[in-house]
Image (cartoon, helix red, strand yellow):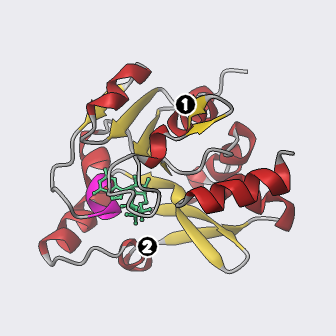
Amino acid sequence: MNDKKNITGIILAGGKSSRMGTDKGLVLFNKKPFVHHIIKAMTPLVDSILIVSNNMAYDTFGHTRIEDLVKNSGPVAGLYTGLSYSKTSDNLVLSCDVPFITTHLLRQLLSHKEEGYDIIQFSASRKTIPLVAIYQKHCATMCEKLLQQRELRLRKLVSSVKTKTIALQEEEYNIVANINTMKDFKTIIYATHD
Ligand SMILES: Nc1nc2c(ncn2[C@@H]2O[C@H](COP(=O)(O)OP(=O)(O)OP(=O)(O)O)[C@@H](O)[C@H]2O)c(=O)[nH]1
């Protein structure tokens, strides 16, 4: 089924990856970089993909790579860059550290996109997941304002606009697990993929 509907996919792949010690999006899962799995999950749902990263290694994935408009300022800056370049109102935004994400789950987010929210995100247990979410392009304006104030917390953006949070079922939590360390990675691999 071709269900592309004027949506841009944005992958945030900047940052320091200090806890991982190496660029997280390029860590291998099933012999492919995390970002490969994210691209694969997004592809059936979006018209084009933007990778926001200053690392040229991401050029090999066959999608447009753009560099942060504001350097060293965290995910809000990555989001600001992606939304500024995007040509569509709806944007499916993912971090580069969710290698278990599936098209099926992302479709759940998209099923709410006509409801008039600025952001639609998941939550797992009580933890919200603002980097597996849909953002309206106009959120770039709020990102810019926050960056000008040096307010770098993504949750500040999420709480400043009209946000819908979709609670996942417990059995879906691992699908959105974000991997910040090799220890996180090994724990989840042993729990779910062995
Ligand atoms: N483009 C862009 N993406 C970022 C930036 N900072 C973080 N990200 C992305 O946002 C997501 C969440 O980042 P974090 O895990 O909070 O931060 P990190 O700097 O990547 O990692 P740590 O140094 O371990 O905290 C990841 O997909 C990062 O690649 C940034 O400055 N620019």
Quadrant of the drawing holding the C terminus: top right
Indicate the amino acid at tag 2.
Val
Q: Position of residue 183 (x, y in %)?
A: 63, 61
Q: Is residue 116 visible?
A: no
Q: Is residue 181 left or right of residue 186?
A: left
Q: Quadrant of residue 21?
A: bottom left
Q: Is residue 146 magenta?
A: no
Q: Position of residue 98 (x, y in %)?
A: 59, 50
Q: Residue at x 55, y 61 (%)?
A: 120
Callout 2 secondary element? helix
Kindly give the residue lying farthest to the left in the view shown: 148
Q: Which residues are magenta?
A: 74-78
Residue marked by disc 2: 158
Q: Residue at x 83, y 65 (%)?
A: 169
Q: Position of residue 96 (x, y in %)?
A: 48, 47
* Image marks 1 and 2: residues in contact by CB distance under 8 Å: no
Depth check, mark 1 against mark 2: the one in front is: 1
Q: Main secondary structure of the magenta part?
A: helix
Indicate the amino acid at tag 1.
His
Label 1 residue near ligand 1, CB within 8 Å = no
